[in-house]
Amino acid sequence: MSQLRRGVLEFCVLALLRDGERYSFDLVRELGDADGLVTSEGTLYPLLGRLRREGMVQTTWRESVSGPPRRYYRITPDGDAALQAFAGQWARFRDSVDALIELGARA
Amino acid sequence: MSTRALHPLAEDYLRRLRRAGHQLPPHRLRELLTEIEGHLTEAVPPDAGDEEALEVLARLGPPGDIVDAEQPPAQAPADRRGWREWAAVILLPLGGFAFGIGWLVGLILLWSSRLWTTRDKLIGTLIVPGGLATTLAILLILSGSTTTNSCSGFAPPINPTTGRAIGHGTIHCISSPGPSAATTAFHVVLAVLFLLGPIVSAVYLAHRAVGRSSSSAASML
């Protein structure tokens, strides 16, 4: 389950960035608030780093008056393409799993 | 790292994260610490109560989990693959030339790695045991099985005064036939197989190591 969650989380991050850049803390908090999606918010930071190294997102540092510089994330064209490809596969995957679970529940 | 004040529990959390991540590459650990410090600065004001701070830290999870996520089990060998896996890939074909010890070291590295499956390890071990050193030995053996001549008989006596031969001696030579064309062709095929075997096996292992380490989570679907 943790492998599935980890794989899906990458695309949840990309989905949150589709409408524009986001501060890393806000991203992490929003994902952390989603029910059953994240067990440890801290593990999202390595995930963000991995997405950056893979060229799925780009970041910009900005000064903050209330603390250390803030890192803002935005999706790249590669990230957007990966998200679109995933979204299509995910719909089929989700429907198939739901159908099998419902079938099992009726049996 | 910022010099701004953090809640004491947040400071302690960063210290534990630094300790837990001491094996990470320094730049990755530095980056993680910066990100988590930023998170703690946002989430835990310096004058926050311990209960509030503990709640934020509980949401962040144990520092060890963050380090594990930075270096998950499937990718851990990949990051450290620098010497272990690549040493195995090099030593298996070439280590046999170091009195066979190099190949044995390569074998130990191969079987101690978590990147390769048992099937991969069997391929690396059996194709070809000893690597190219075995190939060289086989080539030498094959090249030795050529046409041979054996001679017997006696030489004429020598006049001690003149130093010349007296009369004639008799020498008989027998020439053994070399291998047939079919045998030679078999030897050539065998030599090529033994030459390519260790190389192809090493390339296969390198390919599998890279493939396993870079497999994307998206491939689950």
Image: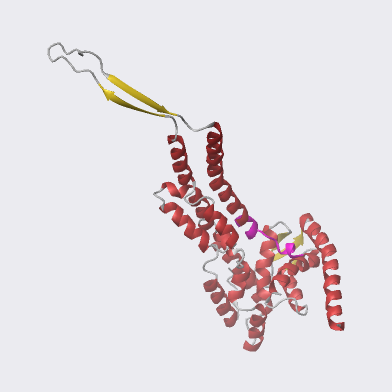
Residue lying farthest to the left in this orientation: B161
Principal SS element in the magenta part? helix
Tally of marks? 0
Magenta residue check for B135: no
Nearer to the camera, B189 or B85: B189
Q: Which residue lies at the image location 57% right of the left edge and 66% below the top edge? A: B29
Residue B213 on the magenta span: yes
Q: Residue A100 at what x, y percent from top left?
A: 84, 75
Tell me the quarter of the picture where residue A82 sits.
bottom right
Quarter of the image for the C terminus of chain B: give it. Answer: bottom right
Q: Quadrant of the N terminus of chain B?
A: bottom right
- Residue appearing at x 19%, y 18% in the figure: B157
Which residue corresponds to the image point at 35% horizontal and 24% vertical from the top-left? B173
> Relative to B162, is B180 above or below?
below
Name the side, left or right, on which A55 lies relative to B70. Answer: right
Residue B21, image quadrant: bottom right
Residue A106 visible from this viewpoint: yes
Residue A46, position as x, y percentages in the image: 65, 67
Q: Residue A62: x and y, percent?
A: 70, 63
- Between residue B168 and residue A18, name the one nearer to us: B168
Quick check: A18 left or right of B51?
A: right
Image coords of residue A55 (percent x, y):
71, 56
Q: Does B113 sit above or below residue A94? A: above
Q: How is the image coloured?
A: secondary structure
Which of these two is toward me, A15 or B18? A15
Q: Residue at x 75, y 76 (%)?
A: A37
Kindly tell me whether residue A19 is visible in this rendering: no
Q: Left of B176 or right of it: where is B70?
A: right
Q: Which residues are magenta?
A: B209-221
Picture quadrant of residue B215: bottom right
